[in-house]
Image (spheres, rainbow, N blue to C red):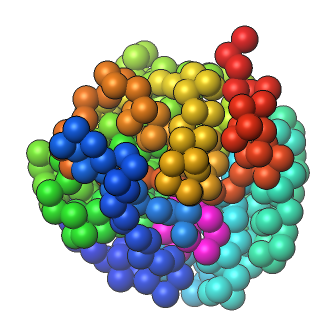
Amino acid sequence: MDLRAFEDAQAAIKSIACRTPLVETPEFSDGGRRVLLKLETAQPTGAFKLRGAANALSRLSPQEAARGVVCASTGNHGRALAYAADRLGIPATVCMSKLVPQNKIEAVRKLGAKVSIVGKSQDDAQAEVDRLVSQQGLVEIPPFDHAAVIAGQGTIGLEILEDAPETDTILVPLSGGGLIAGIAAAAKAKAPGVRVIGLSMERGAAMAASLSAGHPVDVVEEPTLADSLGGGIGLSNRHTFSMVRDLVDDIVLLTETQIAAAMRTLFLKAGWVAEGAGAVGIAALIEPGLAELGRNVAVVISGRNVDMDVFRAVIDGKSPEASDA
Ligand SMILES: *Cc1c(COP(=O)(O)O)cnc(C)c1O
């Protein structure tokens, strides 16, 4: 994927996803290190996934758009697809498993998409998508393993290097890898020396397990504060596995205690609300040695869609998930 793909995506998503602020955060900048936060929490749907969804929809033929789109989503991708499709007048169906938090299901319904709740895992929701594609001719827009989705997410990497060309390290939440693959490819096309570091939770880190195995593997989904990082990478992964393997410099795995501390620190020190998945990059700033950081660090705060009862418990240090027992 070359620079052109990301520049084209940037033009295509402009009217739907916003160019988010990259803000210097003195609270995290010390010891000669400058820290900037890339606030994807400012997207209309509260997470970066709007970029990939908008770019993928921009590439549909009129016939495909008329049939409608479908996805299986743990929440933020479904919300993004619902919003972007609604803006473009394209019918959307979102399939989710019963593990997805209620606030995320309601949010997608409100945005005008049809929601179909199926099974107990991402795989079950995916089986329903496959059925709708083969029986009703809907077009699947997957959450990460899709070239146009990756190009859309990669616009974040372009924006970071446009706004702060001196950036030498980018910290990125990692699940299926669409976000980090796009950011790494775009950022390295502009600044080959930039280091890109992924952060996942220890509980069910599918990409890390797949990289160790040398091929995509399944992991058991477990409850985590970083619920947007749940799910596998797909056993027949086409794009993100090889891109992450070739482009990402390091992957850091976090305990639930570390994820809770990251959410708490981001809120109490800098005043920003993020969901667990959105805050993981902060963990690398809190604990020296977790990741090798340069002098100019950009942290992608990927989303803010957290259940407020969970958020309050985390801030008060009372979250049950916040213990690693
Ligand atoms: C989807 C998501 C991620 C992970 O993105 P991938 O492309 O699956 O690696 C991180 N943070 C949030 C808030 C998300 O919704």
Say whether residue 150 is left or right of residue 100. Answer: left
Answer whether residue 52 is magenta in the image: yes
Residue 202 lies, with reference to residue 162, above or below; the image says above
Residue 323 position, x and y percent, is 71, 20
Marker count (numbered): 0
Answer whether residue 159 is magenta in the image: no
Say whether residue 272 is left or right of residue 72. Answer: left
Q: Is residue 110 visible?
A: yes
Q: Residue at x 69, y 41 (%)?
A: 315
Say whether residue 172 is left or right of residue 5. Answer: right
Please state which of residues 118 and 22 is positioned toward the viewer in this rendering: 22
- Figure quadrant of residue 235: top right
Q: Residue at x 27, y 74 (%)?
A: 7
Residue 160 position, x and y percent, is 29, 63
- Give the residues in magenta: 43-54
Residue 41 position, x and y percent, is 56, 63
Residue at the top extreme, as displayed: 325
Residue 89 lies, with reference to residue 198, above or below; the image says below
Quarter placement of the C terminus = top right
- Figure quadrant of residue 90: bottom right
Say whether residue 167 is left or right of residue 36. Answer: left
Residue 67 position, x and y percent, is 70, 78
Please state which of residues 119 and 26 is positioned toward the viewer in this rendering: 26
Q: Residue at x 78, y 30 (%)?
A: 318
Quarter placement of the N terminus = bottom left
